[in-house]
Image (tube, rainbow, N blue to C red):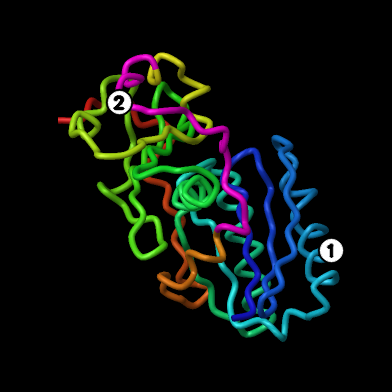
Amino acid sequence: MNLLALDTSSVACSVAVQIGNKVVERHEEQPREHTRLLLPMIESAVKESGAALSDLDAIVLGNGPGSFIGMRIAASVAQGLAFGAGLEIIPVSSMAAVAAQVFVEQDALEVVVAQDAHMSEVYLGIYRLESGMPVEVVPERLQIIELIRELQDEVEGRRLAAGFGWQRYPELLAANQHFFSATSTVLYPRATFLLGLAADGTAVKPQDIVPAYLRQKVAEKPTRNP
């Protein structure tokens, strides 16, 4: 498939274009610069790929969870491009993209991704590799800074922690350190790894995109998991 992938759910602004077997990526980690960076990065990557938007089959959107403002930026740009080119959008998990990169680059049976959700919470995702794809062990959710109950089940293999949330809240890592074999250096989603997730995604019309906020109100107070 010919695809354009983009993700601005974290401090990383990431774009990838896949034309056949060729992939062109642009990736920068600059907080609060997504509005300035995203469109020029898309234009540059599309140009280098030798294709045009009209050659694409779909747009792959890193749909969070993550930064509220960042997610809206990527969703708005994806919608605008899709409307203009007559394309559908395939929303995929930004955290699953982090897990996908870890599975490709490191030996892991299970990857636990934590991203900063602010207010002493993280977005948490637990994934295992099945048929070459990262699959949720439990649904992605908000997690306060405490012991993660699902990690008490032992795994016969390497369980890795990934994502910036472990650095943002070192006390979360300290509370769960004994469940991990190692901590990965993969912190933010890269658009290249969104591309592989598109095969299991469902394409929707641009107007039907709903970002995966998980927390619907920024002002909601954290609550403990039952």
Circle 2 packing at 10 Å, graded few (<14), some (14-19), many (20+), is some
The residue lying at 42 percent from left, 52 percent from top is: 212
Above/below status of 105 relative to 1: above
The residue lying at 70 percent from left, 67 percent from top is: 23
- Residue 162 in the magenta stretch? The answer is no
Circle 1 packing at 10 Å, graded few (<14), some (14-19), many (20+), is some
The answer to whether residue 33 is seen in the rendering is yes
- Residue 189 in the magenta stretch? The answer is yes
Type of amino acid at the residue the image marks with label 1? Ser
Horizontally, residue 19 falls left or right of residue 185, namely right
Quarter the N terminus occupies = bottom right
Give the mark, 2 or 1, whose residue is nearer the N terminus: 1
Q: Closer to the observer: label 2 or label 1?
A: 2
- Does dot 2 land on a helix, a strand or a loop? helix
Which residue is nearer to you in this view: 162 or 36?
162
Horizontally, residue 221 falls left or right of residue 87, namely left
Mark 2–mark 1 CB contact (< 8 Å): no
Residue 149 image point, x, y percent: 20, 29
- Residue placed under numbered mark 2 in the picture: 179
> Over which residues does the magenta segment extend?
174-193
- Residue placed under numbered mark 1 in the picture: 44
Residue 134 image point, x, y percent: 39, 55
The residue lying at 74 percent from left, 37 percent from top is: 30
Above/below status of 109 relative to 222: below
* Alpha-carbon span between mark 2 and mark 1: 42 Å
Quarter the C terminus occupies = top left
Residue 110 image point, x, y percent: 35, 43
The answer to whether residue 64 is seen in the rendering is no
Type of amino acid at the residue the image marks with label 2? Phe
